[in-house]
Image: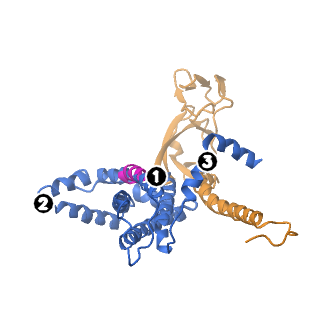
Chain colours: A blue, B orange
Amino acid sequence: MLHKIFIWFDERLDLSTIYRVIFDRKVPKVNWWFTLGSASLFLFIIQAATGIFLSVYYVPSPEHAYNSIQYIMNDVAFGWLLRGIHHWGASLMVLAVLLHMLRVFYYASYKYPRELTWLTGVILLLITMGMGFTGYLLPWNQRSYWATVVGTRIVGTIPSIGDFLLRILRGGTDISAVTLMRFYSVHIWWFPALLGLLLVIHLYLIIRLGISGIPHEDD
Amino acid sequence: MEDHSPSANLSRRDFVTIISAFLGTIMAFAIGFPLIGYLISPALTSLTAKSSRISLGLLSNYSIGKPTLFTFTRAKINGWEKTVNSYAVFVLRHSENEMKVFSNICPHLSCRVLWHEDQQKFICPCHDAHFDQQGNVISGPPPRSLDILPHEIDPSGNLYIQMTEV
């Protein structure tokens, strides 16, 4: 019965070809360092899913941000678990993406014809860091406040346009409700949308060009 | 590897399928249970009614034979926010020690009723419900008369009501 249903869909959607192209690709003999890309993808999915769940209770306003997180942690069933996964998953994702980048670099996998895979990967790495930076402010506690003071001041040190950029980041001269709201917006809409788009391109390129093997002495 | 035991009832492929389905089901429950619990959590908090004693001041402040409005506020915490709600009751003294305390909430759809001194009626402005001075329905859609709140008077002449909040 299940098989018949599958056949019905497969006739119309050609699912088996999609499966073959994505999962039955030929890959060179590689090692465990080559799993870091998949690990990053898995962590991104975890972060997206737990983030959607957190947005059910989180409020991005100075009056309620801290209290709404206290509510998630203490009163909502399994709120501590979802926030915990989002919190630790964030650090783990930055780590996985960085190690993934180092693997590609040390195995010289960025060379022809995979330059675009590398370039999209670099932007994905930067967006991941941006996700970490914007997400850090959202708990609206002392640590996140002062981390954002310092982080935005770093941008402010750029000669001549630094002060202007700082005011764009903060949405004014101070870290305020405006800052919290725009960091939230960037954290849950702009960066994830951009990240998702580049991820599709990145994965398309990996499927299109295949992955490189481990270089040999005579290469 | 070929299957070398044709007598076996379970092929290797079937075995893997069954084990995957079994473990998959356990994992789906392990993930699904916390997620559903997280979403429906606010609906699961205990609904035990909280009864509080509210002071309405000295009984002698209320004149006999005329429903008098007394307003007060109660704070309630919903999630991460504290909300202050306004409430009001009508105190109707029949004599020195006999009295009724009504809720001003219309039993129809919870609008607030008003006392009209000229008509000697409580009127609900939402759907034109009329109640007599004793809180009984005269006309309109309400299913029952105005709710009566339990009251007590302490030895020094202070009036209290018991209010039940969900």
Residue A61 visible in the current orientation: no
x and y, in percent, of residue B107 in the image: 63, 33
User: Could you tell me what secondary structure mostly forms the magenta stretch?
Assistant: helix
Q: Quadrant of residue A5?
A: top right
Q: Chain of mark 2?
A: A
**How far apart in space, not on screen, are marks 2 and 1 (Cα)?**
46 Å
Q: Chain of mark 1?
A: B
Q: Quadrant of residue B11?
A: bottom right
Which of the two residues, B37 or B51, is positioned nearer the viewer here?
B37
Other-residue count near label 3 (Cα within 10 Å), few / some / many at <14 / 14–19 / ≥20 = some
Other-residue count near label 1 (Cα within 10 Å), few / some / many at <14 / 14–19 / ≥20 = few
Which labelled disc corresponds to residue A159? 2
x and y, in percent, of residue B142 in the image: 65, 28
Other-residue count near label 2 (Cα within 10 Å), few / some / many at <14 / 14–19 / ≥20 = few
Query: Would residue B68 appear left or right of A174 to someone viewing this image?
Result: right
Q: Are both tags, 3 and 2, on one chain?
A: yes
Say which element carries label 3: helix
Q: Is residue A170 magenta?
A: no
> Amino acid under label 1?
Lys
Which labelled disc corresponds to residue B82? 1
Query: Would residue A154 appear left or right of B96 to someone viewing this image?
Result: left
